[in-house]
Image (spheres, rainbow, N blue to C red):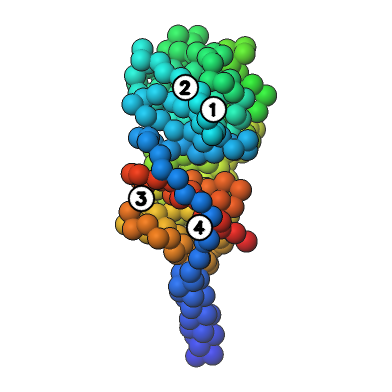
Amino acid sequence: MSKTLRQILVLLFIACFSSIIFGQSQKVNPVLISKFKIDADEFIGYDSFGYSYQIKNNVFSKIKGNEIFEYKNVSLGNITKVDIQNPLKIVLFYEDFNSVVLLDNQLNKMTEINFSQNTIPIVVNAIGMSTQNQLWIFNTLNQQIGLFDYLKNEYKTVSIPLTESIKYYQTDFNTFFWIDKKNNWFSCDIFGKISSLGTVPDFDKIEIISPQKYIFSKANALYLRENTNTISEIEILEKTFDKYYYKDQILSIFTAKEILNYKIVTR
């Protein structure tokens, strides 16, 4: 390698390294817009109508002002996962019983599905609402992502078998996102196309905003990743928190006593 080429490569490395460090040194200063006390074991989030969702003593509730709706099903054990993307069809997942319950907007039971009774064997450990009366499913029996039509009780696989176990997953109507045990980040669309989205830093909790953005926590600090070279710390007042939730530029921090809502703008 020539001396000139070596110098160019060194300069490029320094420029890239400096860019990453600069990005990581940035701070995001959100604005506190509201806070209120809450009596819950877990805060789920908000819907587009302003209702908040939470779990207390394994009772799922929906609250707005004086309006309170509740649902409980003691026969299915603990609630493992809640999907409120469609507030007219809310998904409650009970992993211990391999079952899911769909609720309407007043938390009345619409459908209860026991996947152990399906004609095609399914053991579910990841689930979410998809399009056209379908649920995203990750079937541990074949390590594949699939779609389950809850009106027709029909199941189809859409992905090839995954080679690494899932560390975290999140879904929207058209996409199943997951991060594997090696912190590799992927997406799968409803047609089964899998895309690699890179790797993520080590995290305690994470929430995906888009294929380019996510918020993650590590050691009770919050960070925002907006592109490949920018990881910025989000400066909030709370030194400890149980969970956070991001929707429509509002970052909600759930502590043991209250929920604090911050306005935060991502690029």
User: Foreground: 178 or 133?
Assistant: 133
Identified by mark 4, the residue type is Leu
- Circle 4 sits in a helix, a strand or a loop, which is it? strand
The x and y percentages for residue 126 are 45, 30
- Kindly report the distance in space between the C-alpha atoms of the residues bearing marks 1 and 2: 10 Å
Question: Mark on residue 32?
Answer: 4
Identified by mark 3, the residue type is Phe
The residue that label 1 is drawn on is: 67
The residue that label 3 is drawn on is: 241
Q: Earlier in the sequence, mark 4 or mark 1?
A: 4
- Kindly report the distance in space between the C-alpha atoms of the residues bearing marks 4 and 1: 25 Å
Q: Residues within 10 Å of mark 1 (few under 14, many from 20)?
A: few
- Circle 3 sits in a helix, a strand or a loop, which is it? loop
Q: Earlier in the sequence, mark 3 or mark 4?
A: 4
Q: Earlier in the sequence, mark 3 or mark 1?
A: 1
Quarter location, residue 192: top right
Mark 1 or 2: in front is 1
Mark 4 or 1: in front is 1
